[in-house]
Amino acid sequence: MVLTRSQEAVLESKSRMSENGNRQASQDSSPAVTVSSEHKMLYIIFISLVIDLLGFTLILPLLPSLLDYYGTHGQDSLYHTLKTSVHGFRELVGAPDTPRWNSVLFGGLIGSLFSLLQFLASPVLGATSDVYGRKPVLILSMLGIAASYALWAVSHNFTLFVITRIIGGISKGNVSISTAVVADILPQEKRGKGMALIGIAFSIGFVFGPIIGAIFSRYAREHEGQFYVVPALFALFLALLDIVFLMTFFKETLPENKRAQSIATGWQKKAYLINPVSLFRFSSVTNLAPSSLDSVRRIGTVYFLYLFTYSGLEFTLTFLTHHRLQYDSMQQGKMFFFIGLIMALVQGGYVRRIAAGKELKIAKQGIVILVPAFILMGFSGTATFIYISLILFSFASATVVPCLTTMISQHGGEDQKGTILGVFRSLGALARSLGPIVASTVYWSCGAEVCYISGGVSLILPFLLMRQIKSHQD
């Protein structure tokens, strides 16, 4: 469950576009695609992303039921090893030894593992595409994703399911490459349209994908089949369709004269995106005024702390409603649809009207609203209270990340923005790789109330740090 990914996709687009801006401006004499076909390529990559994200999000409402299933029917050596390794800690904290309770912990482990592998692999795949071109690496990435879905369809035990998530995490570099494609084909003054389309693709995927997955899961249950097989096969169909679509219609957008000469050099340039110390210090940003660098570091720290808590509690939300309200996959899918709808209304009717210089105020407002939202979730015992908290949750989801992104994009020159935004995006990816396992461990060991209340209270820290940040217009 990654509801701010559309916002992060736009952020990644900005990063890629800024990094490639000067290079493209000086080398436009030999583009890989003509001006007349740039819009065609833009919509081809948009359609490809929509297809991919519909398949990627099918699993979201199924995850609690999947892990319950593996805890009851698909236990194997890996599952038992994990149970044994946490046995002492379980006795210490008094956590119950049941498949349903273990599913929260194991789900957090899998969620963080997937995000960590994506965090590590995306810069590598991006650098590889800088050398060999976008199309072959994009198709290679989709082949890996298709393989993960094929294995998911036959994953009758926990070990196979974990392997599917490992393959999927390593292969999930297609989003980064897609944003590079937008930077390749559009001149700087038109790239806002490309960013918007990528954000729309994510919104479509994360609103409709979960409900489609829930529908296919219900169909499988009604026909006495394994509930995950039909969604997995449909995800595989979408991935194969995407591969055929790209092979047929997508043209290479990075000509040979613009490509990096050495893959080793490309990887070295991307190394700063996976070094936590360098990320927090923004070490790769040079020639920035000390006051501006200090603000950039503070905004980056706020972003990490916020997204660390947000992504962890966001991930456990499906387990909370599954355990406390007995939500099945269909009800989970409807919940995702509700959240996406509220976010769309807030973004369309409120966020786009935020006046310049008011971003800091609105970001603070969003974090403050999220505190009671999480606390209410922790105490909620009925669907009514859950949905009230989801309204607050959706408002914060729609406002905080866009405002922080706008704030940090106001620092640095045009030749620095790409690096600043790239580091900023990587801090978010790092937070998402740590948040789920930490939140799931707290949920598993202390219960939902402690998990959500402590998560809500912890947001006070990024709020206090924001008070030390000056608005760009101050």
Image: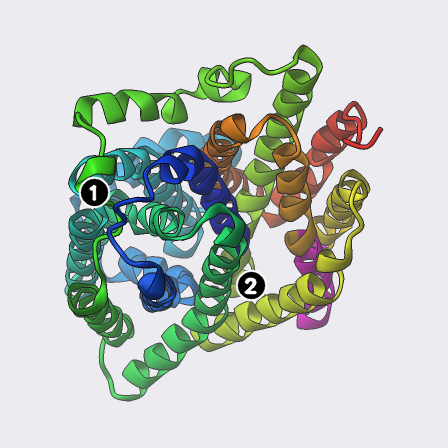
Is residue 412 magenta-colored? no
Q: Residue at x 68, y 66 (%)?
A: 348
> Which residue lies at the image location 43% right of the left edge and 30% below the top edge?
89
> Which residue is identified by label 1?
78
Relative to the observer, which residue lies in front, 417 or 221? 417
Which label is found at residue 142?
A: none
Residue range highlighted in magenta = 377-396
12 is higher (above) or lower (below) than 247: above
Q: In what element is the residue under mark 2?
A: helix
Rendered location of residue 387, percent (x, y): 68, 68
Q: Identify which amino acid the numbered label 1 is placed on.
A: Leu
Asked if residue 269 is positioned above or below residue 472 in the image, the reply reads above
Rendered image quadrant of residue 36: bottom left
Amino acid at circle 2: Thr
Instruction: Give the residue at mark 2.
Output: 321
Q: Nearer the viewer, residue 80 or 216?
A: 216
Magenta highlight: main SS: helix
